[in-house]
Image: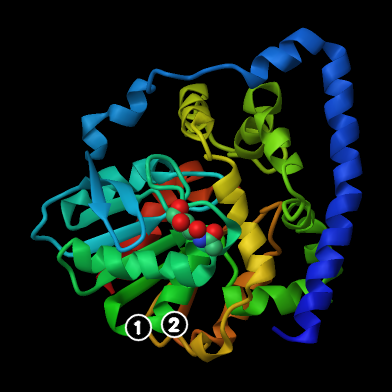
Amino acid sequence: MGLLHYFQFAVACAFGLWYSLWIILHLVLSFMKGPITFVKDFFKKRDVMPSCLNDPGLGSHEFVHLKEVRLHYVANGNKKKPLMLLVHGFPEFWYSWRYQLREFRKQYRVVAIDQRGYGDSDKPSGVKNYSTEKLTGDIKQLISALGYSRCVLVGHDWGGAVACHFAMCNPEMVEKLIILNCPHPAIFASYMRKNLEQFRKSWYMMFFQVPVLPEIAFWANDFKLLESILLGEKGGVQSQETTAADIEAYKYCFSSKGSVTNPLNYYRAAFRYPLDKKNIRLIEKPTMIIWGCPDVALNQELAPLAGKLVPDLTIKYIEDASHWIQQDRPNEVNKFIWEFLNQ
Ligand SMILES: *[C@@H]1O[C@H](CO)[C@@H](O)[C@H](O)[C@H]1NC(C)=O
C-alpha cells in the first residue's frame, strides 16, 4: 500500500468521525421523541419470511458450497440455457432482481445470488473477508459450480464493481457485461479525490469506516434508514414498482445476525485494501452501462469515464430513474438488456 492510500484512508476516517457527530445527534433526537419505542425497535424480531420471497414465479432457492462460503441464490429458467448471473449491490439482496428473474428465464438460466455477507449466504467475519478479490473469487467459483464456463454478467452498485473486477481478471468467463449505476472500480477513488461534488455524495462511505455506529443507524427506528434509502422522496425508487411489502422483505433480510455489519464491511474493506494494480486492465468484452441519472450517490459523469478502460462500451441513460434502476424501471432496463444481448 502506498502513502497516498494511507493518507486517503486517514482522511476518510476523519470525515467519518465528523459525520458520526451528526448521526449521533440524529439518534439522540429520535430517542428523545419516544424512548420506549426507540429501544423496543432494536429488539423487534422478524421470524416469518414474507411471502413475496417465496414466490415460485421468481424461481427456486438453492445453495452452493464454494471454497470459503456457502452462497444462496434464486434460479429461474432451464438449466440447459446459457447462464445470466445477477449480482446485487448495497443494501440489497437477490430480491432486487425480481423483475429480471421473471423476464430473462425465457432464454437464460437466470441466477440471482446473495453475495457473501448478505441474506441467506454465509457471512464470514472480519473486514478482510470482504475484499474485492474475495468477492470476485466467489463469482469465479460459482460459475464453475453451476456447471458453466462463461456467463452474461449483470451487476448493480457494489455488484457492478465486483462484475467489472471479475471481467478484468477473468475475461474468458464473460460473454457480455452489463453494469447498472456503478462506476468502474478502478477509476472511482481517483475521481472522488478530484471531484468535490462526488466527494460530498460519498459521505456515507466515509461514515461506514467508523465501527458500530453505522450498524446502529441502520437498526434504529425499525430500519427506517433502509426504508428511506430505497423509497425516500430524495433518491429512492421513483415509480410504483417497489411497494411496502417489498421493503418489508428487505427489512426481513437485514434483520438476521450479521446482516448489517458484513455488507458494511464491503466499504471498510474497499478503503483498507485497494485493488491490486496488476488486475487493472482493459475490459475487452462488449459492455453496456445503464444509468439512472438523478442518482444521489453517484455523478452521471462516471458512466462515460468507464470508457477509458472499456473500449466496447454502450451507455443507456434513463433520465428520471433512481439509483435502484432495475427495480425502479424494470421495463426499460429489461428492454435495453434484450437489445444488447440480441445485437
Ligand atoms: C474470514 O472468515 C473465516 C470464516 O468465518 C474466519 O475463520 C477468518 O478468521 C476470517 N478472516 C479474517 C481475516 O477475519
Q: Nearer the viewer, residue 291 or 223?
A: 223
Three-letter residue code for mark 1? Pro
Q: Secondary structure at mark 1?
A: helix
Q: Nearer the viewer, residue 186 or 302?
A: 186
Left or right position of 210 against 185: right
Q: Residue at x 58, y 41 (%)?
A: 260
Residue 149, horizontal then vertical, whole percent? 20, 74
Q: Quadrant of the C terminus?
A: bottom left
Residue 72, horizontal then vertical, whole percent? 31, 46
Q: Residue at x 44, y 82 (%)?
A: 168
Residue found at the very far left of the displayed protein:
80
User: Which mark identifies residue 304?
Assistant: none
Q: What separation in Å lies between label 2 and label 1 (alpha carbons)? A: 6 Å
In the displayed structure, 164 sits above or below 269; it is below
- Number of marks drawn: 2
Three-letter residue code for mark 2? Met
Q: Label 1 neighbourhood size at 10 Å, few (<14), some (14-19), many (20+)?
A: some
Can the viewer see residue 157 in this picture?
Answer: no
Q: Residue at x 87, y 48 (%)?
A: 19
Can the viewer see residue 258 in this picture?
Answer: yes
In the displayed structure, 334 sits above or below 270; it is above
Residue 42, horizontal then vertical, whole percent? 65, 21
Residue 193, horizontal then vertical, whole percent? 80, 75
Q: Which residue is mark 1?
A: 171
Q: Are marks 2 and 1 in contact (CB under 8 Å)?
A: yes
Left or right position of 79 against 250: left
**The quadrant where residue 318 appears:** bottom right
User: Which mark identifies residue 168?
Assistant: 2
In the displayed structure, 179 sits above or below 230; it is below
